[in-house]
Image: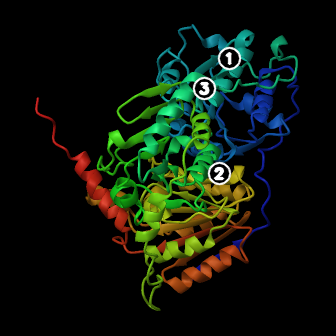
């Protein structure tokens, strides 16, 4: 094993930029925004400075309960806010006008697809420039300042352009409250000359939000429960499947309540992994059509009734639209609607209310769970490599499985890590995140930074492919600067493996980097960082022992060399089916 051990002067909390002169922020827009972020649960704001946001950043730094985390680029700042929101429930980033906004927008689109409330704040032009014919820098050279706003309109649930202090208070509070209610990102642009000007509307501390809870239509709820009970009591072997919208509906507890009461086996859709407790006695694994966990696809697809809670059926989650699910057997529970088979459908019935009410009415039926236990065959020969054999991916993930506990969290990058991490069995309280709906390669670097900053009680284990890492590698720098102790497994297989299995070509081969050398250069002796290269199982075992022992307080970067064709069997199956879906000929006109 080749290892580099360069531990510098010691880790410390993510440092603020150089001290700024004290500013009188009481009664100002900047002070109000800072206090409002703290009030909703934000303690770290991810930023990239630019001349239009510098004064605003001064006011955020002046708030003692806020920590400003400077990122290497806006895309990673957005990904970090995404990861932070997954752990904390809300995240925030601050960038500059247009050049920053259009750079962060890809990350904000991903947060929108995953139903994450991210407050995206942009430092905007001087308020005096609105309505003039002036051409400003950081624009495309036209006297029109709405280009950035128009781009954000499709990837945020509301937008606020604050260029007047009289209504700034209302605009900021409205946008933030909508983000929390809708669980979607919002865009707030603040003119660069406004943050420090006192105004009477900001004369007192922000009044805490009181977001009225959504209540189900009681008659609709009762009707939905009655119709569902009637449907399920006719079934012999029903099953329960959790989907990704459990998060936005805040219905995880109610889901477990229903699982306890019903006796049904519980599976998760791939994008819901981590939202359902895998230590539950009824948990059977991931339902993902042809690439499901062993024996799970057979149990779900042979059921005579299935309750899908918060599903998203897209081409990826349906394995190229090949699920053997019949609508007439399905109950679909969405955050605010319940649909039974081909009808009826009950609106304004909220998921958590419905699941809790249903749990009180259902008869216990464990037939499908008993069937699962009958057909289940435990894994056979323990995975291991021979002494001089090259390390295999399945052996790597056997060792990662052994690292997991309630004080860890797994971040899975887009690619073969999706499939390998799906097979990990998560212990109680072990976190798990990946971005399946949007699937933006490179997401995991920024998301790992944000998640680790929010969940300081957990050690994050990130599984990242070499191709994805090349997109966003720079913010390893910020992880070291913040004193994070994440373990990153960089899987070096020479290219975009997931795309190879969908459609191969020379464009899927990338230039190999000396990844540990790069991280050592970024480390540069400042902070705590340890790197290693591994090619064989005994080297891996040694590296993991060091990362969890002597270097347990360091950022640990382990570069794992595997063969370019060493993939999970699930990726091979999934890739061929997605390729077939992508390659469908046009319908006859």
Q: Which residue is mark 2?
A: 451
Mark 2 vs 1, N-terminal side: 1
Q: Position of residue 357 (x, y in %)?
A: 61, 37
Q: CA distance from mark 2 to mark 3?
A: 33 Å
> Which element is circle 1 on?
helix
Few, some or many residues within 10 Å of mark 2 (<14, 14–19, 20+): many
Quarter of the image for residue 554 reads bottom right
Q: Measured along the vertical axis of the image, is residue 508 above or below residue 133?
A: below
In primary-sequence order, the first of circles 2 and 3 is 3
Q: Position of residue 555 (x, y in %)?
A: 67, 65
Q: Are marks 2 and 3 in contact (CB under 8 Å)?
A: no
Kindly indicate whether the residue at mark 1 contacts the one at mark 2 (C-beta within 8 angstroms).
no
Q: Identify the residue shown where x is 51% and y is 49%.
A: 272
Can residue 106 be seen here? The reply is no
Q: Is residue 132 above or below residue 387?
A: above
Chain-order first, disc 3 or disc 1? 1
SS assignment at label 2? helix
Q: Which residue is mark 1?
A: 171
Measured in 3D between alpha carbons, the distance from the residue under mark 2 to the one under mark 1, in whole angstroms, is 28 Å
Residue 69 % position (x, y): 71, 45
Q: Is residue 116 above or below residue 186?
A: below
Q: Quadrant of the N terminus?
A: bottom right
Classify the position of the C terminus by image quarter.
Answer: top left
Image-quadrant location for residue 402: bottom right
Taking 175 as reference, is 285 left or right?
A: left
Name the residue that disc number 3 marks: 216
Q: Is residue 129 left or right of residue 581?
A: right
* Image spot of residue 71 (x, y percent): 64, 46
Mark 1 surroundings within 10 Å by alpha-carbon count, few (fewer than 14), some (14 through 19), many (20 or more): some
């Amino acid at each position: 094993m080749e290892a580099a051990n360069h531990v510098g002067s010691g880790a410390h909390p993510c440092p603020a930029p150089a001290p700024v002169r004290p500013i009188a922020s009481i009664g100002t827009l900047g002070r109000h925004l800072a206090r409002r972020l703290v009030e909703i649960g934000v303690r770290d704001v991810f930023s990239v400075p630019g001349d239009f946001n510098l004064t605003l950043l001064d006011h955020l730094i002046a708030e003692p309960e806020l920590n400003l985390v400077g990122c290497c680029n806006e895309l990673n700042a957005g990904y970090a806010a995404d990861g932070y929101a997954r752990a904390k429930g809300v995240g925030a980033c601050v960038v500059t006008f247009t050049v920053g906004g259009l750079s962060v927008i890809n990350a904000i689109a991903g947060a929108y697809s995953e139903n994450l409330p991210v407050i995206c704040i942009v430092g905007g032009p001087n308020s005096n420039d609105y309505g003039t014919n002036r051409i400003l820098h950081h624009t495309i050279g036209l006297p029109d300042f709405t280009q950035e706003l128009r781009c954000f309109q499709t990837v945020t649930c509301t937008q606020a352009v604050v260029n007047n202090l009289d209504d700034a208070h209302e605009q900021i509070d409205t946008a933030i409250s909508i983000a929390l209610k809708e669980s979607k990102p919002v865009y707030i642009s603040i003119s660069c000359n406004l943050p420090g000007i006192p105004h009477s509307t900001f004369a007192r501390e922000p009044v805490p939000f009181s977001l009225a809870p959504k209540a189900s239509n009681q008659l609709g709820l009762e009707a939905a429960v009655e119709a569902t009970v009637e449907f399920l009591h006719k079934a012999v072997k029903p099953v329960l499947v959790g989907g990704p919208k459990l998060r936005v509906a805040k219905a995880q507890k109610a889901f477990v309540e229903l699982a306890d009461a019903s006796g049904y086996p519980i599976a998760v859709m791939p994008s819901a992994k981590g939202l359902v407790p895998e230590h539950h006695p009824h948990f059977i694994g991931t339902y993902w059509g042809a690439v499901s966990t062993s024996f799970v696809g057979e149990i779900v697809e042979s059921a005579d009734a299935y309750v899908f809670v918060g599903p998203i059926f897209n081409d990826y989650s349906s394995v190229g639209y090949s699920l053997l699910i019949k609508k007439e057997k399905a109950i679909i529970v969405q955050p605010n609607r319940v649909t039974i088979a081909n009808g009826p459908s009950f609106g304004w019935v909220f998921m958590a209310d419905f699941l809790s009410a249903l749990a009180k009415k259902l008869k216990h039926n464990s037939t499908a769970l008993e069937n699962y236990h009958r057909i289940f065959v435990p894994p056979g020969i323990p995975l291991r490599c021979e002494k001089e054999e090259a390390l295999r991916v399945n052996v790597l993930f056997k060792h990662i499985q052994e690292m997991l506990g309630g004080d860890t969290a797994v971040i899975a990058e887009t690619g073969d890590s999706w499939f390998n991490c799906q097979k990990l069995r998560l212990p109680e309280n072990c976190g798990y995140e990946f971005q399946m709906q949007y699937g933006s390669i490179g997401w995991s670097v920024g998301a790992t930074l944000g998640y680790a900053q929010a969940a300081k009680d957990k050690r994050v284990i990130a599984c990242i492919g070499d191709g994805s890492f090349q997109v966003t590698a720079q913010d390893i720098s910020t992880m070291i600067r913040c004193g994070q102790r994440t373990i990153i497994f960089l899987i070096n297989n020479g290219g975009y493996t997931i795309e190879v299995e969908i459609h191969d070509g020379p464009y899927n081969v990338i230039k190999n980097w000396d990844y540990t050398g790069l991280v050592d250069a970024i480390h540069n002796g400042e902070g705590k960082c340890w790197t290693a290269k591994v090619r064989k199982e005994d080297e891996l075992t040694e590296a993991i022992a060091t990362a969890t022992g002597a270097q347990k307080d360091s950022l640990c970067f382990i570069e794992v060399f595997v063969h370019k064709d060493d993939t999970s069997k699930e990726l091979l199956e999934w890739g061929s089916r997605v390729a077939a879906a992508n390659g469908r000929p046009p319908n006859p006109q």
